Amino acid sequence: MNYQPKVTIIIPVYNGSNYVAQAIDAALAQTYKNCEIIVVNDGSKDDGASERIALSYGDKIRYFLKENGGVSSALNFAFEKMSGEWFSWLSHDDLYYPEKIEKQVLFINKLIEENPNIDLNKITVRCATESIDKDGNTIRVPDYSGVKEYEKPIETIINNVYNYRLSGCAFLLPRSCIEAVGGFREDIRTVSDVEYWYRLLFNGYEFYCMTNERLVRNRSHKQQVGKTKVNLFDKELNELHISIADNLANMEIDSKDKVMVKFYKGLIYRHMKEASKYVKEKYLRESTNWFQYYVTLPISCGTKWVGGSLRNVARNIYRKIKVK
């Protein structure tokens, strides 16, 4: 491995005394040693519990306390303090496998070998993930079989609407992207990470995925902001996808009508009512082949939308008329 950049692991924490020690331990256990670990306490209100845990690690980590402003503000704060050439976000309630950073750096080295002229300032590398419960037991292993190691940005944008595979903690990102597109939006409280990935995609970043490397454990629990602020989460998610639709409409894309229909179908699949209504009314032309759409929708959405018998009828119709 010739390219061995310094990597900054950023751990934002808010009232995280129940999990933050596990996150710090996972960061310290990385087999790739050219790392620094920054823990940012985003104004926790837990009688100093999170701070005491972080301080107990001494100079093994760099610890900062700031006023509460949300996870985006904590990440942006860390960006100003980091010294790494690349950075990786680790939520205080998530975990890395020990080889996470090393295998991602090895992957970057492979890309360099295959293409010595590759612009490292315009790529991101992410790994596969798994979900765990509050006690650390694996509860779900997503299927990455249909994910390509590299796909065009427009493909990633469309595919992510159907199945969120752009997990924040799975990424390894070049520091230069902060200068190029800015930091995380602090006015978005629940989906600022998703907004950032799309912003990178719309700015021409190439997303690589280590589909066979499950290196991050995302914890699912009741205290997550998406579950404690459901109404805000739905509102921000719809607003975000409305802005994505506008960006798609302004891009030079082959078969733009088909792209917008696929995007619309993805919105319905994810139950984003406001965003899907907006896209349908503003961007889907009267010439859209709605018969094709309503035949293929049950097939793509399966039992989540219709019963098995109706789905089979739709599939048979689809096969007879050979809708493409």
Image (cartoon, rainbow, N blue to C red):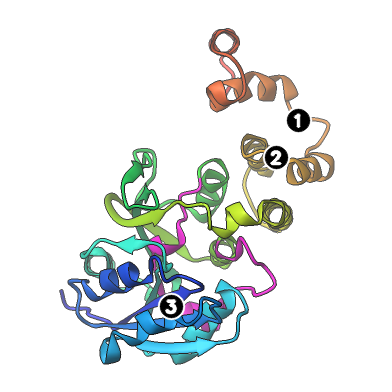
Q: Earlier in the sequence, mark 1 or mark 3?
A: 3
Question: What amino acid type is highlighted by mark number 2?
Answer: Asp
- In the rendered image, residue 189 lying in the magenta stretch gets the answer yes
Tag 3's secondary structure? Answer: helix
Q: Earlier in the sequence, mark 2 or mark 3?
A: 3
187 vs 252: above or below: below
Question: What amino acid type is highlighted by mark number 1?
Answer: Thr
Whether residues under marks 1 and 3 lie with C-beta atoms below 8 angstroms apart, the answer is: no
User: x and y percent of residue 56 in the render?
Assistant: 30, 85
Specify the quadrant of the image occupied by residue 94. bottom left
In the drawing, does residue 206 fall left or right of residue 250? left
Residue 288: numbered disc: 1
Question: What amino acid type is highlighted by mark number 3?
Answer: Ser
What distance separates the C-alpha of mark 1 from that of mark 3? Answer: 54 Å
Residue at screen point 38% across, 58% down: 208
Residue at screen point 46% across, 62% down: 168
Nearest the camera: 269 or 186?
A: 186
Specify the quadrant of the image occupied by residue 189. bottom right
Q: Earlier in the sequence, mark 1 or mark 2?
A: 2
In the rendered image, which residue does mark 3 sit on? 50
Tag 1's secondary structure? Answer: loop
In the drawing, does residue 45 fall left or right of residue 61? right
Of labels 2 and 3, the one closer to you: 3
In the rendered image, which residue does mark 2 sit on? 257
Of labels 1 and 3, the one closer to you: 3
**Quadrant that contains the N terminus:** bottom left
> Which residues fall within the magenta stretch?
164-193
319 vs 285: above or below: above
